[in-house]
Image (cartoon, rainbow, N blue to C red):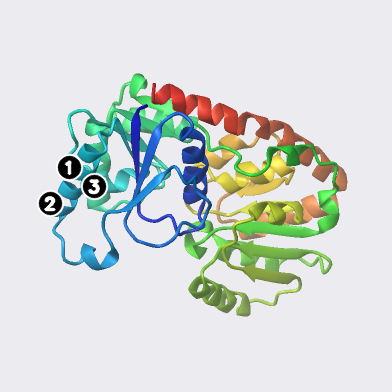
Amino acid sequence: MKNITFLINTLSAAGGTQRVLTSLVNLLVKKYNITIIVLDDKEPFFEINSEIEIKTILTKKLIKTFWLIDFNKRIYQELKNNSCDYYISLDSNSVLLQSLFIPRKTKLIVWEHFSLSKNFNKILFRLSRFYASIRTYKFVLLSEQEVIDWSNLYSIPSRKLTLIYNPITIDEELNFLDVDLYDNKKVLAIGNNIHVKGFDYLIHAWSLLDKNDWTLEIVGLSEKEQIKLNKIIDNYDIKNDIIINGRISNIKEKYLKSSIYCLCSRMEATPLVLIESQYIGLPAIVFDNCEGPLELLDNSGLIVEFDDVSKYSVALKKLIDSKSLYEELSKNAKKNSIKFNSNTFYKKWCEVLS
């Protein structure tokens, strides 16, 4: 069996990256020896197969005292001790900091979860992405647009670029449930960062809507972010209810109790939450600034010009007021999401690792 090592900052977060990584390793462990290196000693938020080894290579306390060169030596030693065949990083921004030394046997794979065009523009991150473009054996990217962008910007040959969409990680039989989601009368948004996910835009748009029987629920924010969001809400005359919740592990229940999914992100690659909400049958309303989310839609949502809050509110009202439009988009969403099934995801990863 081949040995595969993943590197991620933490498994304790409830984000889409942690959820999709957990889904992948739980599938791959049937065929490969899996090790996950994390940079903290907190418990994983999502359940991980007991056969998968989790190693803490560096805690927050050690980060302050260890030099970068020592950190890379420790990673090198772990890869060598594991007789690692593939070393998989989930972030090209940090490849320069975590992959200076790799055993000759080990092949570096970057599984990129950021959008290249909307990524952070810090010099260190740009250097890391350039280093990754030279050093990496293969890139696994989340959309066709990302494949084009990486190829054009860094002249990476097509053989090194692989498109693998994020998979559905919830029960796939839910797609066949015959339920009227419209009657839930709830708009759902999920994320852990107000600015990145554009929740300030969403609150403003919601304040312009006058539909007293509908509710907005925002899920996934830390306590600190919830406090910040409540301050934003206080700046508006809100006519409709808003529910704010922290992170949860059973996200499918939120999908099933909602009617519409809102994506207002300033930056986004290929959001897992959009894929899964489509699978349940939730029509989406998205801004047009990120290519990844637009690629996921196929007449299954409404698209609004970026940061035009008034038009976003109009789109919400349009979808709420027209049940026939709602049912058409909902039907398209379910049909469209079939291509994101976990079996296809698993097979494509096995091809990369073959």
> Given contact means CB atoms under 8 Å apart, are the residues at marks 2 and 1 in contact?
yes
Residue at the (81%, 41%) spot, across then down: 177
- Camera sees residue 291: no
User: Which quadrant, please, contains the C terminus?
Assistant: top left
Q: Quadrant of residue 183?
A: bottom right
Q: Nearer the viewer, residue 51 or 280?
A: 51
Amino acid on which the number 2 mark rests in the picture: Ile
Marks 2 and 1, Cα distance to the nearest angstrom?
8 Å
Give the percent coordinates (x, y) of residue 291.
51, 39
User: Which quadrant, please, contains the N terminus?
Assistant: top left
Amino acid on which the number 1 mark rests in the picture: Leu
Q: Which residue is mark 1?
A: 100
Give the percent coordinates (x, y) of residue 73.
15, 47
Q: How many marks?
A: 3
- Camera sees residue 6: yes
Report the side of 293 relative to 239 (left or right): left
Task: Check residue 98 in the rendering and tell me which mark sits there, or answer none.
Answer: 3
Dot 3 surroundings within 10 Å: few (below 14), some, or many (20 or more)? many
Marks 1 and 3, Cα distance to the nearest angstrom?
6 Å
